[in-house]
Amino acid sequence: MPLNETQQKLVGDNAGRFSGLRALFVNTTLTPTKRGRSHTENLMDDSIAIMRGCGVEVDYLRAADHRIAFGVQPDMREEGAEVDDWPEIYWPKVKAADILVIGTPIWLGEESSICRVIIERLYAHSAQRNDKGQYVFYGKAGGAIITGNEDGIKHVSMSVLFALQHVGYTIPPQADCGWIGEVGPGPSYGDDMENGARAGHDSMFTRRNLTFMSFNLMHMAKMLKDNEGLPAVGNTVTEWS
């Protein structure tokens, strides 16, 4: 949905404030681009617009467009996979990003299967360290965007955000947002309605939470970057080797 007046004013008042930050949005819809638009992407676009308007350099990847091997090693080709787009396409952007936002639809009350693959591939880098000897994702902020037409936003956010913090991401307050329609078959986010409106575009709750999430992620990432990440006290792996 296009940004409303409140969102536009916030972006205008903070234009360039977060320059120097990089964000990566990974959409884990099950639908590749050639098969049509993604409801999850429609909602992610608003957060992307806010961050870009505030000076953040943003990358976007739609995981269904690539062949990402399942597994928990950095390069699954070394484990027998014929193809693995993770090492060349995903890992450089993940490594460079100060903010990672994972978007997923809800299927049977859970995140998508592709979302779990992305989380497993993040976990594959558990053995890597930053220049302080901490886990490699220390000093980065993480968030989640959820869409669907059934209950489960908080449940799916819980799973995604727990996984991100477990591998080392810092999770700020209100680091998730989402939209769901009525339970059962029906329109998904951004679908055309009989009255000419778009499903979900009139939800002030979704707009507010998306805006909170976007700014909190930028605030957290900037604080971390300005302070060179988390202090390396009591959390370096080398102390336990």
Image (cartoon, rainbow, N blue to C red):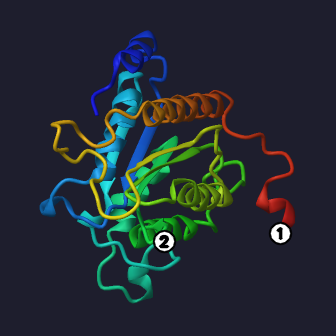
Q: Give the SS element for disc 2.
A: loop
Instruction: Tell me residue 203's x, y (percent).
Output: 40, 35
Instruction: Tell me residue 114's x, y (percent).
Output: 39, 69
Instruction: Tell me residue 131's x, y (percent).
Output: 65, 49
Taking the spot 38% from the left edge, 12% from the top edge, the residue there is 12
Of 132 and 215, the residue lying toward us: 215
Residue type of the residue flagged with mark 2:
Pro
Q: Nearer the viewer, mark 2 or mark 1?
A: 2
State the residue position of label 2: 74
Of 142 and 9, the residue lying toward us: 9
State the residue position of label 1: 241
Taking the spot 53% from the left edge, 36% from the top edge, the residue there is 213
Of 75 and 158, the residue lying toward us: 158
Q: Whole-Å distance between the Cαs marked 2 and 1? A: 22 Å
Crowding around mark 2 (Cα neighbors within 10 Å: few <14, some 14 to 19, many 20+) is many
Instruction: Tell me residue 32's x, y (percent).
Output: 21, 64
In the picture provided, is 156 more to the left or to the right than 47? right
Crowding around mark 1 (Cα neighbors within 10 Å: few <14, some 14 to 19, many 20+) is few
